[in-house]
Image (cartoon, rainbow, N blue to C red):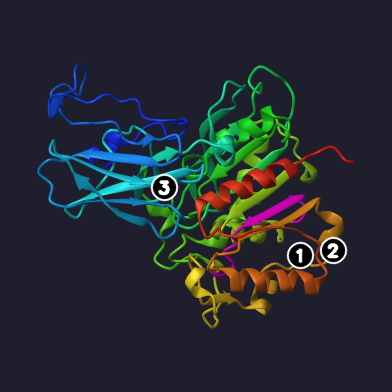
Amino acid sequence: MKTHLLLALAFASASVFLHAQQSQPVTAEHAAIPGGDNAGLPRPATTRSPEILPDRRVIFRLVAPDAHEVFLYGNWPNGVENSKTVMTKDEKGVWSATVGPLKPEYWAYVFSVDGVQLLDPSNPHALRDGRRYMSTVVVPGPESNLYAVKDIPHGTLSLVWYKSPSLEITRRALVYTPPGYEAGKDRYPVFYLLHGGGGDETAWDENGRASEIFDNLIASGKAQPMIVVMSNGNATQIASQDYADDAPAAQPQQPAPGASATLGGSTVFAKSIPADLVPFIDARYRTKADRDNRAIAGLSMGGGQTYYAAFNNIDKFAYVGSFSGGWPTLPGVRTDVPVPANAAVLRGPDLNHSFDRAKFEAMMPQLNASVNEKLKLLYVAAGLNDALMTAHTDFKNMLNEKGIHYVLMEKPMYVHEWPFWRVALSDFMPRLFQPAK
């Protein structure tokens, strides 16, 4: 349900790997789009943008001869505070800016033209992150290799609808089945992958390059073939925000018990995973329907939902992971803490928040040392420049004091951002469902 014509025209194929744009200039400032229902609609003048240079500098261009002021906003060097670059205009009315060198990554950007934000009309590649739309560019290199579309066997990404009696609605999920699933008879383990606050069921594929990561890890033999389920973590939404409005039936006058007004009922959705989603997937797909072949992980808000679902249903999951776990997002546990001394180098939400340990433990009664014998993997990941560092440290201390074993992945110079969550997914997935050594 796109509400802006420019977005509808510019939004396309965020899952295609971009080495460099090859679009050619349009001689007329507004050429008609030939044929079809779009005949006669204006098309913006285009030029080559973005252009990736051999040294990984990137040139961005925009044809806007009547504009007075144009800026480029990009999510480099991190995904929380965008960089702002002044663009300059040449005698032909083409504005340009050169940034970088940028490290190999999947970057997002927009233009601001006299205060109006717009996508790059020369670039068909874009993504949606909640209510934000951004043009995208992949800078090639070893660090972004997993995000490339390669000549390898590909899995299938399906949009499926399932009934959720717990939420009293029918809702949508994305399901990835590995290469060969449709032609074979084998059964597969299942990985439930949750998004963060503001996202929806498409977030991991659009922003996280999930399908490309799955394909490349499986093709290289680093990860086992598996089914991956990406559902919508907002309890009031039947589907992604660009597709459907919130379900009226899921918006009672008073929030459901445990629901969060801002996060769509964090624990309400978490309860629905083992109650509704897992049975649906096991009934519809050829799954290995036992806890040893079931994993769950999530980023930020989805990390909190993951732990709530897993440690109230330890009989359902053998692999559990959090990426930048948003522990303060769980209802009723957030506490205020002093701003860290190194706050200037931290980026993300909840800089001065952590969680009440007693309330957290009461919410997850099965999170104790007994999980050492029950889980095959407990995984904790965070960027060391994430604003959630206080909550992250408190969480590690809690696990240590309880004698709970876990695998820790921390990386410096990463904040609360998709570049880190893609790295975490790429590190977590190869650890799943491996043959016993």
Q: Secondary structure at mark 2?
A: loop
| Residue 306 position in % (x across, y down) | 63, 56
Mark 3 or 2, nearer chain start: 3
Q: Secondary structure at mark 1?
A: loop
| Residue 134 position in % (x across, y down) | 35, 45
Nearer-the-camera pick, 283 or 13: 13
Q: Which residue is mark 1?
A: 366
Label 1 and label 2: CA atoms lie apart by 8 Å
Q: Which residue is mark 2?
A: 370
Crowd class of label 3 (few under 14; some 14 to 19; many from 20; radius 10 Å): some
Q: Is residue 402 left or right of residue 116?
A: right
Count of numbered marks: 3
Q: Secondary structure at mark 3?
A: loop
Label 1 and label 3: CA atoms lie apart by 48 Å
| Residue 312 position in % (x across, y down) | 70, 61
Q: Are marks 1 and 2 in contact (CB under 8 Å)?
A: yes
Q: Give the residue type that dot 2 points to.
A: Ser
Dividing the image into 4 quarters, which one contains the C terminus? top right
Q: Give the residue type that dot 1 points to.
A: Gln
**Is residue 237 found inside the magenta-colored segment of the image?**
no
Q: Which residue is mark 3?
A: 100
Label 3 and label 2: CA atoms lie apart by 49 Å
Q: Which residues are magenta?
A: 314-328
Nearer-the-camera pick, 130 or 158: 130
Crowd class of label 1 (few under 14; some 14 to 19; many from 20; radius 10 Å): some
Q: Are marks 3 and 2 in contact (CB under 8 Å)?
A: no
Front of the two marks 3 and 2:
3
